[in-house]
Amino acid sequence: MFAYIVRRLALMLVTLFGISVIIFVLLRVVPGNIVDILFDAAGFVDQADKANLEKELGLSQPIAVQYMQWIGGLLRGDLGYSYVSEKPALQEILPRIPITARLAGLALLFSASIGIPLGVISAVHQGTRLDYALRVVSLSGLSLPSFWLGLLILMASVSMFGTMPIFNPNPATWTEALAIYAVPAMAVGFRSAALTMRITRSSMLEILRQDYIRTARAKGASETAVNYHHALKNAILPVITVIGIEAAFLIGGLIVTETVFNIPGVARFLVEALRWRDYPIVQNLVMLIAVVVVVANFTVDMLYAAIDPRIRYTD
Amino acid sequence: MPAEETVLDVKNLQTVFFTNSGLFKAVDDVSFSVRRGETLAIVGESGCGKSVTALSVMRLVPDPPGRIVGGSVTLEGTDLLDLDDAAMRAIRGNRISMIFQEPMTSLNPVMRIGDQITEAVRLHRNTTRKEAWAKAVEMLRLVRIPEPERRATEYPHQLSGGMRQRAMIAMALACRPALLIADEPTTALDVTIQAQILALIVELQKELGTGLILITHDLGVVAQTAQRVIVMYAGKKVEEATVEALFENPRHPYTRGLMASMPAVIALGSKNDARLVEIPGMVPSLTNLPAGCAFAPRCGLAVDRCRAEYPPLQDWGDHHFAACWRAAETAAPL
Amino acid sequence: GEPKQGGILKVYHRDSPASASIHEEATFSVNGPFMAVFNNLVMYKQDVKQNSLESIVPDLAESWAWVNGGKTLNFKLRQGVKWHDGKPFTSADVKCTFDMLMGKSEQKFRKNPRKSWYNQVADITPNGDFEVAFNLKRPQPALLALLASGYTPVYPCHVSPGDMRTKPIGTGPFKFVEFKANESIKITRNPDYWKKGLPHLDGIEYTIITNRSTAILAFIAGKFDMTFPTEVSIPLLKDVKTQAPNAVCVVEPVNVSTNIIVNSSSPPFDNLDIRRAMALALDRKAFISIMFQGQADIGGTMLPAPGGLWAMPKEMLESIPGYGPDINANRETARKLMEKAGYGPEKRLAVKIATRNIPIYRDPAVILIDQLKGIYIDGELDVVETANWFSKVARKDYSLGLNLTGNAVDDPDQSFYENYSCGSERNYTNYCNKDIEKLIDQQSQEADAAKRKKLVWEIDKKLQEDVARPIVYHSRAGSCWQPYVKGITIMVNSSYNGYRYEDVWMDK
Amino acid sequence: MAVINYDSELRRAGAHATHGWRRLAFLGQRYLLGTIGLFIMLTFVWVAAAADLICRFDPLSVDSAHRLAAPSAQHWLGTDSFGRDVWSRIVHGARISLAVGIGSTALGSSIGVLVGLVSGYLSGWVDLVFQRVTDILQALPLLVLALVMTAALGPSLPNVILAIAIPLIPTVSRVIRANTLALRELQFVEAAKSIGMSETRIAIRHVLPNTLAPLIVLATAQLGSTILTEASLSFLGLGIPEPYPSWGRMLSESAAEYVRTAPWLVIFPGIAISLAVFGTNLFGDALRDILDPRQRG
Amino acid sequence: MTDARPLLEVTDLVKHYAVRGGILRRRVGTVHAVDGVSFSVGVGETLGMVGESGCGKSTVARSVLRLVEPTSGSIRLNGVDVTHLGKADMRPHRRSMQIVFQDPFASLNPRMTAGDIVGEPLSVHGLASGRQKQERVAELFQQVGLRPDQMNNYPHQFSGGQRQRICIARALSLGPSLIVCDEPVSALDVSIQAQVINLLIDLQRKHGFSYLFIAHDLAVVAHISHRVAVMYLGRIVEVAEKSELFANPRHPYTQALLSSVPVADPKMKRLKPLIDGDVPSPINPPSGCAFHTRCRYVMDRCKVERPVLAEAGTRHQVACFLNAGTGREAEIALSTSSRP
Ligand SMILES: Nc1ncnc2c1ncn2[C@@H]1O[C@H](COP(=O)(O)OP(=O)(O)OP(=O)(O)O)[C@@H](O)[C@H]1O
Ligand SMILES: Nc1ncnc2c1ncn2[C@@H]1O[C@H](COP(=O)(O)OP(=O)(O)OP(=O)(O)O)[C@@H](O)[C@H]1O
Ligand SMILES: [Mg+2]
Ligand SMILES: [Mg+2]
């Protein structure tokens, strides 16, 4: 098991290295850099000033050198300075992490706590009206553009309650705190709840056809015991995988939701930084996200092994 | 034998499947009974309705598409088909148990063996978890699993096929059922393991006095284990006899064909290139069965009547039933 | 009533400015929050809606005087003024600031977008700690107008330009607290402000909300005391009015012109006929009706009246080809011109119309394409990312471009020099006409306001006739605040100069 | 024992419809939701194909006199702020959405299939490299990748399609690879080998056709999500640029300004997007049930 | 006829599979699937091969056809060593040997018509095309008892026995001299099984094929083979003429195997398994004689030393110390006939 984990970590490093190269090169392939954008507002580009600025920011060095500098710094824990704010990138990124983490956590919680039970219900009542209704609801969750859902929530909230949950770094009451996180989390979570529900459903249907379910029935186990005790534990495995994969997709949802709800989390920050071609921020944020995704996948694998005794990472 | 000795009495059982390719009469008017301590074998080719018969007795036919549409299944005096679900659950695993064909997939992969047996015990016996666990270990020992304490804490994938099938048997017998149904319990196993498992089942059955329905397509297995045999063809019972009578004097042409087409185990004298007696044609689909005898298209003895009218089961003496218009002519030993 | 003291004014900000350094930036996204941190030498009186030489009042300079035949501008500086970090303000700071703007000092701005404003300044000479003289190469009366802009704060000598980008130090009514990119900007009352009793507010908090719908919804929901100035579009204004009927909203010109940059250095627009035809095809009213539901202005380079000081009279304007009221007649002429150039219904001219991928650029381009259809021109939109726009323009990699030009100060010196003088960086079309150049210099030196106006009209008209950079319209925009917010003045001929906010207060 | 109506039971099981149209009609009934989905999809395809026939207005033609007109007999779904007919724009938008949906799904799927097939079939180091690449693509958030791509390539229809297609590759290639690995073990592949068939030919003739069913299921599922991704990109300002009437942009830009004053500008594109995605999802679901025998209930 | 020159000679065939684990797929163990197997098949001869599941029968079959690369050993076909031939060099030899698999459901591509499946080898080897191919396929169909009009049907439209016929037709299409049958009837119904066996016998009679016939059903093997090899855990433990083997099984495993077969005669109830315990894992095969963990006659020697296959009678080879000439004969009562 230990050896396995070590090996997995090694592979993670390979993946992360690949991502670092891709994002680094990709960013430099994108036409226009921070300097172009800084000059944008000025309404012209002063070539001499531009060259100076590029030199100052280290952009005139060869790409390989820039890459080595970035990675070298990264290994020392130095993420460089944001081109825009001129503050240490770490200082810019760090305070935004808990915000997004809370949002993502709540969204996943929402998705699991709604999606899994509904999926089971839908599978158990397969072919009934309840099943149809639940499937239609879940599909509509997958059919709404998330920014649209977010805006609808905001508009409904303003016209119904005269107020809306807008981000506030120091919420006064816990209800406010809940509102500013839970409402956007629900807006993102809806999609993944729908997805979770569908996966749970089809996985349950698959499992319910298995021989050991018949064995459980032959023992005289009640339907509830069959569904929740025997079937769900097996059916949950693909669901976990999907939730793990969703971690990467969630970032996409968060970008939109953080924009709509104006939440200063890492996801929106990433897009802003991208708009500014603020390489140190983009690069490091992408790496951060990649680490999260890779770790999430690893966690999923571990969870999988914990639930399914057939999987033992013994090598 | 006195009537109360009868554990299970199935009368005119009819189970159908409504599928998109039509109506499958998987079990068509099948009757049989099993006495305490007796082994009844059901033989027949793949798809002839053996498993569905067993599942009908357990009332585990998947619905949809299957449905028991007629007959009665009387277990120790109660008609199972009249029971509500809760009452049926109380009987399943308690009075009737079943061992399935596939030992590899019939155990829940994410539950420990011990827990799965414990569950069976606790569903029907009012015991503590600890007592039930002890019972589970005891059952594992009974089915000759070495180191039962350790094995009980293992998961199915850690056991070999033979051991899994033994665990299934332990689970099925945990509540000392009056009737055990074994649906091809050894098909997936090797010959040497098969011999072990069959010997075990027969031994335990004797010990516990359980009635046993053994489903198989292997006539050798039948000969070695059963007292009585019913032969099924295309959902119908075509012959029923004691095992000796059947092997000595099969009356239905299908049974005869079956026996003849089996290569002899040790064909000392036979030439290696001797052709086998084959039954021509193929097993009919259960939809679109011919009007008369389902075997008629493959039967060398078939006459016009066979193709027009289904032959009723007739007693040819000594509880030897066969459904063939020409059974009288086939009475001579092979 | 009497101004009340206290309260934090909450405003949303339309986007995250690149830095806090006004001198290095060229957008009112920076002026908005940071002008209040600084003082100028002189400034436009904050409660007068129309900026003009007459509305200029002393700020850090107690007084000023033109001497030496209009070639020297002397300032007497206020004494006892302290920077927010406690250091005293002196004439050295003024010299530092302007030397740096002229690119003469050791320390350099990263970007210096308004360097050309000081083209006529030879040097700056302090005279003791509290007097300073601007020595000009030739008279330029409009210099004062430039110095009064929100774009011209005085920076401290002892703070590096880099620090000014992140932690600006000023002498103004509010002190910088923090600037979290994409999140918020906070400034707080300067208790030691040299204007006693000011400012009224305890502080101002800008929350950066880039998504307009969210921002407006939040304002409607009462989360903000004020919208970002001039950021409410006409359709949204309707929304605000219905949902927050108490809010005070105004719509004013912002002195930003939407114009078409024409690449006259390569075919087909090197042909004046085709340029003229294009100008004639424009239906400016339709643009305004679509983009602003009618609420915008038609004019030349200079901001139209009544907001603008330098607009041509109506008759003169309508005499310019394409400005006449009879659109159909104009288009008929245009078609003739096109046919003359060899085009027609059978042989249509295909052009790409480059513009930035932002609605305020893209939308008029869409209308333009539609209008050009009528004169045998098939336009295709070529949307360009912000980062690539100026390099594309500089490469002359376009035929037609749709562009917005913001004018910080309603003064011909600013707009003509920046956009039309030969060799100016912002003269995208490289329009270079020696006659016009001469006229521009002439008006710049003209001290007589009436004479100068005539010259300006003449220049403006010529520019339009040459179709160098046809002006389509001058936009207006809305600003809203809650009724209890007092002392806000939205200026009518500039959106860069009115954010000192020292006398804003809240009636709460 | 309850009386059983054999006929109706059989009808429910579809026994009366084994072939041709009747079978289709039965499947339509059995998978009612899927039929609705198919109907929606076909409608959109038809609308896209016949766009020029069913609109009376040029979707790009500006009309300042009839701007923001409410839905009426003249303009069925009203007009936008440019006076462009919303119905025409939505109808032509179907083309864009279909182009984006089908284009990116097809592109992503075909690259994914190639990668998955090669990786699953060749195993060894090729597989290892391909898998690492998929890992990498998977750990890069989809929207971020699309954002960088559109930024890099500029916002045009083909570029948006490409940007949306690339993130699809890892999912497709994973599924195909898993399938290929499973198929490779199947005896008919071995049988092909035993007659001396070349590996490439085996891959193309025997393995590829058998991955088709899961691929189709996957592709329909992704069709919907690509349309949504385009909408999200539009919302973030990087979708299909003007003048193409993209539903995503119609929705996201109008939402800001006109949701109250001219709700038809928001409602109809919103409905179009949701319906299209909903339709493909419904259909995809049913398709999965029909094509994947294990899923059959 | 078994005295004829050998068509296939397999010498010391070894096939080890690496057990790989984890993502890096490192070798974490070795499956000794086939661990030194030698045998030969004469022209027109049928060599039966029996053994429990996992003992390496299929691996032998697949190695012979070079569907897996043997770890070591040699395979000679018609006197030519084909063990190390490259893909191209192997192609002509592929025509001489063909395989029929156990599962007729899995061995036919569900998306090809029966005719295409049978005709494919012809086009791969460029033997026939177009009309000619059609005719040849039709002929093959007839040969295996299928109607030529079924050529356009898809595999799912055939029954199990018919599918196995398609497989056989495919194998026949190249005119092989050796057909490897890897459990060709295990998946078939009892009454169909006889049809396929008869077909194989008929074909052999007609064309003089050699068969390597693998099955776990002793009765079937006994019926069709001339000689029978018994495998246990990757090795052949006994090989002899059929009649010799069944009359006089020498290896305790062969004896156990024979005794485990349920005899279809109710008068002979003798279901007393001679061995118990499970087959050991081929990843860690027991030391010495692999069978010693289950053997009734196990001696100390068996645990450390591996007996080699040695002549123990006329054309009868056994790998057991008991039979090394002097040892005590394993006693066992076997029924001679099972037919009622
Ligand atoms: N779930 C089902 N849906 C439709 N038809 C079914 C179903 N289960 C069984 N059948 C049909 O019922 C018939 C009898 O099946 P059954 O499983 O009893 O056969 P069997 O005799 O047990 O065969 P085997 O030896 O292969 O196990 C088959 O022809 C089969 O097609
Ligand atoms: N590709 C492979 N990789 C690893 N191990 C394998 C592979 N193929 C077969 N094995 C292992 O090799 C051993 C022999 O397998 P083989 O298929 O030859 O057995 P068999 O005698 O044909 O069994 P059966 O009767 O079940 O078909 C088994 O333990 C099997 O698990
Ligand atoms: Mg069965
Ligand atoms: Mg095998």
Image (cartoon, rainbow, N blue to C red):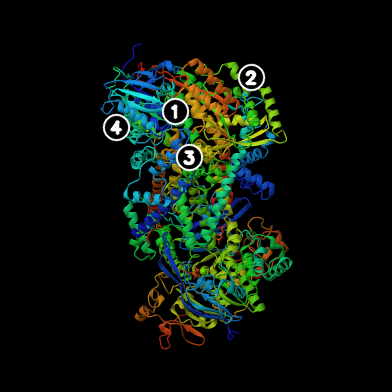
Name the spot of residue C176 as percent of width and height, x first: 32, 29
Residue D66, label in figure: none
- Tag 4 and tag 3, C-beta contact below 8 Å: no
Chain of the residue displaying label 4: C
Name the spot of residue A57 as percent of width and height, x first: 39, 43
The vertical placement of A5 against C109, above or below, is below
| Occupied quadrant, residue C107 | top left
Residue C215, label in figure: 1
Residue that carries the numbered disc 4 in the rendered image: C158
In what element is the residue under mark 2?
loop
Front residue (pair B88, C178): C178
Residue C325, label in figure: 2
Q: Which quadrant would the N terminus of chain A be assigned to in this image?
A: bottom left
What is the three-letter code of the residue carrying label 3?
A: Arg
Label 2 or label 1, whichever lies nearer to me, is 2
What is the three-letter code of the residue carrying label 2?
A: Pro
Mark 2, other Cα within 10 Å: few <14 / some 14–19 / many ≥20:
few
Label 1 or label 3, whichever lies nearer to me, is 1
Q: Confirm or reject: label 4 Cβ below 8 Å from ligand 2.
A: no
